[in-house]
Amino acid sequence: MRKTKKRILQTILTLGLVALGALGMIKLTESKPQIKKQTVEVPLLMVRTMEVRTASQAVVVKGEGTVKPLQEIDLVPQVDGKVVYIAPSLINGGQFKKGEILLGIEPEDYQLTVTFAQSKVKSAESLLRMAEEESEAAREEWFQLYMDNAGKGKEPPALVLKQPQLAAAKAKLAADNADLKKALLNLERTEIKAPFDGRVEKEDVDLGQYVRPGEKLATIFSTDSAEIAVPLEDESLQWFHVPGFTPGNGPGAKTTVRARIAGRERSWKGRVVRAEGKLDEQTRMIRVVLRVDDPYATKPPLAMGLFVTVEIEGHNIPDMAIIPRSALHQGNVVWVVDRDGQLHYRKVKVVRIDGERVQISSGLQTGEQVAVSPLKTVTDGMKVRPLPQKEADLS
């Protein structure tokens, strides 16, 4: 009996403790402040932008090429003989002026030939005078013998006037004069003179060397002008004038040639002068030729063989804007960010894409902000956080 009561008492006590614990839990739960639901704001996407600037500008077409001389020739003798003089400037890289004697060949044999030819001319002149006098004497004798009416007013026969002998004397004098002219010409050719202001590219001759006509002694080039052939796409030629190729008259487009030489960045002014005869069959490009006058006037000069970049100044376009290549999408779409931070699609008219430069002729206005950041997901009208940056270097 006692055991039964004891068990009932323990059960009641256990249930009381459980009820007391449950009551305490309820009280604690009721006293805890309610958590309010809050809406978390999604941060706006940050977008780098640049300010648009429009102005009347010329379309600039860029290209590359190698500087070559306008004139380059091999120095060869026209007569044979021993070399007795070489100018100090006739060395690799030497500089010379037009008319300067670059090389001399022993002239004695040619001087003797001139003397002999002069003596033959003197003899032929004497023979001609004698033939003329004999012809005149024969004429007078004929008229004295035939003064009757039958012979009056008639011209003496050619044989009587010794005209064949007179013609032969004249022909001999002409031939001897030709021999003298040739001898003088050969004597003059013993001195090889510079045909233009220039420099020596390569020299291969020494004093005492016996040279023959047509033998290559040196290679020289003119420093009056330099030319650069620049391969360009066919569509590029619509933006500037190429004499003899594109419509219009007048001189070709102005150009700026840039290169790094002797540790310095240098530039030279030039002009488009022509286009080469045909398109390249493999690349389908046209080679446009630029000319720079007096390339060696500056130090360092626009040296031959130098690899250069060129900028061709094309036609002016009003209200043209230049943006970086990263700001253009789908060929003709840019993302414009308005003052409220909303991003909008905008179609523009692209004039030319030149490397990282995109030239826009219409569709943008000065002061507008264009997105230049690469974004994966973009919708028209989405809110963004613009981050203006300084004008990019698009040169």
Image (cartoon, rainbow, N blue to C red):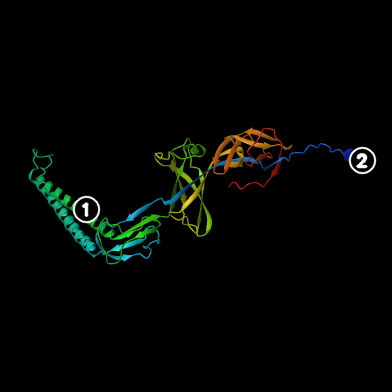
Of the numbered discs in the image, which one, if any, rests on residue 191? none
User: Badge 1: how crowded within 10 Å, few (<14), some, or many (20+)?
Assistant: some
Q: Position of residue 136 (x, y in %)?
A: 14, 49
Of the numbered discs in the image, which one, if any, rests on residue 2? 2
Please state which amino acid type lies under the numbered disc 2: Arg
User: Badge 2: how crowded within 10 Å, few (<14), some, or many (20+)?
Assistant: few
Lateral position of residue 70 relative to residue 318, left or right: left
Sequence order check, earlier mark of 2 and 1: 2
Which quadrant: the N terminus?
top right
Vertical placement of residue 360 versus 192, above or below? above
> Secondary structure under badge 2?
helix
Q: Position of residue 345 (x, y in %)?
A: 65, 33
Q: Is residue 324 visible?
A: no
Q: Position of residue 359 (x, y in %)?
A: 58, 39
Q: Position of residue 153 (x, y in %)?
A: 13, 39
Vertical placement of residue 114 versus 360, above or below? below
> Secondary structure under badge 1?
helix
Residue tagged 1: 178
